[in-house]
Image (spheres, coloured by chain):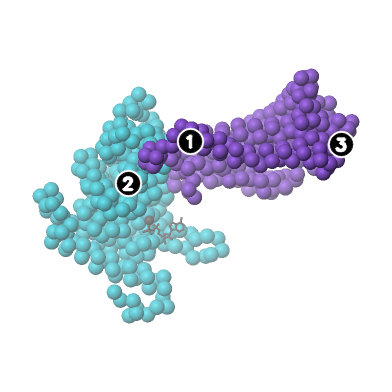
Chain colours: A purple, B cyan
Amino acid sequence: MVDIAERPTRLAARPAPTPAASTARPTLPGRLLGLGGRALHRSAALLALAAVWETAPRVGLVDRVFLPPLSEVLTAWWALLASGQLAEHVGASLTRSLTGLGLAVLTAIPLGLLIGWYRPLAELLGPLLEVFRNTAALALLPVFVLILGLGETSKIALVLYACSWPILLNTIAGVKGVDPLLVRSARSMGLNHLRLFQKVILPAAVPTIFTGVRLAGAYSILVLVAAEMVGAKAGLGYLVNYAQYNFAIPDMYAGIITISAIGLVVNQLLVAGERRFSTWRVDPTA
Amino acid sequence: MTTDKILFDRVTKVFPGRRGTGGAVTALDRVTLGVRPGEFLVVVGPSGCGKSTLLDLLGGLATPTAGQVLVDGEPVTGPGLDRGIVFQQYALLPWRTAAGNVAFGLEAKGVPRADRADLVAHHLELVGLTGFADRYPHELSGGMKQRVAIARSLAYDPAILLMDEPFAALDAQTRDSLQDELVRIWQATGKTIVFITHGIDEAVHLGGRVAVMTSRPGRIKQVIDIELGDRDAQDDVRSSDAFRHHRHQIWTLLRDEVRAAQSAERPVVPEEARVG
Ligand SMILES: Nc1ncnc2c1ncn2[C@@H]1O[C@H](COP(=O)(O)OP(=O)(O)OP(=O)(O)O)[C@@H](O)[C@H]1O
Ligand SMILES: [Mg+2]
C-alpha cells in the first residue's frame, strides 16, 4: 500500500500576471480556437480509444461477443439507467464506500494524530502497523465475511480497513513532518502542548492528511467493487459480475464504464478539496 | 550585578552526544555575561562556538548543564512572553497571512480578539509593511518575511528581544535598511536586545557593546564598548575612524579564535601552512 503513497499535490505560488499577456492578447476567435484546440488535444487519446472500441469489433478484429462495439454498450447503459437499475446499484455502492470512507476518516485521523505526536505510542504500535499495512486488504476479505457475514457490515468493514491505512500513514507523516523550527518558534512564545497542537501541528499537517483522504477515496471504490463480486445482491461490482455470469456482455461493460466514471469524479472532487486545503504550500521544485 | 537585565552566571552547556558515538560536546564553558536594561548587545564568535546555544538557554528552550541564566534576577525556567526570539529562518506559519502571523504571538499572550487588529496594524506599520497584511509568507521577499517576524516578536511586547543572525540570509541592501530600522525601533521602544551575528560590520554598526566569544568550548573572550560618537551626525558611520578601529579590534580577536577552531577541526594541517 505504501507504494501508492503519493507526493501531495503541491501548488505553485499564485502566478503573477505576466506583462506579455496584456500586450499580446489574442483576439476572441483566436482564444476560442486555442481553447478548443487544447480540449481536443487533451481528449484525443480518449476519442481514439472510443473509435477503436467502436470499429475493432465491427471489422472483425476482435470477437464482438466478448467486446461489443461501444455504441451497443452505451445503449445497454442507457437502458440500465432508464429502468432505474443503474441508480440502484450506484446507490448501493456509493452508500457502502462513503460510509466506509467516512468511518475511516473519523477513526484514522485522530489515531494518526496521537501516534504522530506521542513517540511512545508510535514505538509501541509501529511493528503492528508495519505488519497490517503490508497485508493486502482483499486478502482479508474471507476473514471479514467469516466473522461479519455476507451482509453490508463486512463490506463496509473492508472499505473502512482499506481506507484507514493511507489516512493513518499520511496523518502520522504529516504530524512528524512539521517544520521543527515552527514548533520551536511557537514554544518560545510559551504555547502549551494543547495550543501548540491546535495552532501549529494540526494546520501544518492538514494538506498531508488530505492527500491520505484522497488516496483512500480511490481505495474505497477499488476494494468495494471487488468485495461486491462476492456475495452481494446490489452494487456495481455485483452488476459487472452478474452480467458476465449471465452473458449480458454489454451490461457488463456498462457497469465497468460507470465504475471508471465514478472513480474519476470522486478523485476530481478530492483533488479539488486537497488543493483548497493546501494553497499555502509552495512547490519547492517550481 | 543586580542592575543587570540578563545575567549568565557561570553557564555551562554539555550535549551528551548520541548513543554509541560517545563524545559529549561542551558547547559553553562557564560563560559569565551581563546585559544591562535597554542595552543593544551583540554576540560574535566563530561558527559552532555556542552562540545559538546561548540564545536557546536565554529563551528557555534549553536548560544549562551547570550555572544559571537570570532575567531580572530570576532564574529562567522555560519560555516566556517576556522574551521574543527572531530566528534566522523567519519561522513564519505558512498558512497564515502576514497579519495572521503577527497576531499569533498576541493569541499566545491572550490578548482579546478586539484589541488584536489595532496592534497588528500598528506593528506592521512599524516595520514598513502596511499594505502587505493579507500576503502569505510565500508571497513575500526574504526581507519582508523577516520584517513580519520582527513585527510578530514586537507585537506581544517582550522586554527582551533575542535575535539569532536574523539578517544573515538577506542581501546587503536589504540588510542595511533592516539594520537601520532595527536601531530606530530599539531607540523608540527601549527594549533590551541580544543580537547574534557573523558579520563584524554588523556587530560594530548595531552594538552598544560587542561580546566576542572563543571557539568551542565557548567562553566570553572580551566585551568591547562601541563608541561611534553621534550616529545621526555622520552620513556614513561605516567609514569613520572609530568604526574602522572597532572593526579591526574585533577582527583581530576573532582571527585567533577562527584559527583555533580550524586547527581543532583539522589537526593534521601544520599551523604555518594556513596563515592569512
Ligand atoms: N542539540 C544538540 N546536540 C548535540 N550537539 C549540539 C546540539 N546543538 C548544538 N550542538 C553543538 O554545540 C556547539 C555549539 O552549537 P551552536 O549552534 O550554539 O553554535 P553557533 O555558535 O550558533 O554556530 P553557528 O555560528 O554556526 O550558528 C556545536 O559544536 C554543535 O555541534
Ligand atoms: Mg547558530
- From the viewer's side, name the closer residue of B33 and B96: B96
Kindly identify which numbered label has been placed on residue B143: 2
Corner quadrant of residue B119: top left
Residue type for callout 2: Gly
- From the viewer's side, name the closer residue of A282 and A28: A28
Asked if residue A26 lies left or right of residue A136, the reply is left
Asked if residue B79 lies left or right of residue A168, the reply is left
Residue type for callout 3: Val
Read off the chain for label 1. Answer: A
Q: Position of residue A135 (x, y in %)?
A: 75, 45
Which residue is at 37% across, 33% downward? B134
Q: Which residue is mark 1?
A: A30
Ligand 1 sits in quadrant? bottom left
Q: Which residue is mark 3?
A: A65
Tell me the CA gap for discs 3 and 1: 46 Å
Same chain for labels 3 and 1? Say yes or no: yes
Which secondary structure lies at badge 1?
helix
Q: Is residue A251 above or below residue B260?
A: above
Tell me the CA gap for discs 2 and 1: 42 Å
Corner quadrant of residue A136: top right
Q: Is residue B94 above or below residue A79?
A: below
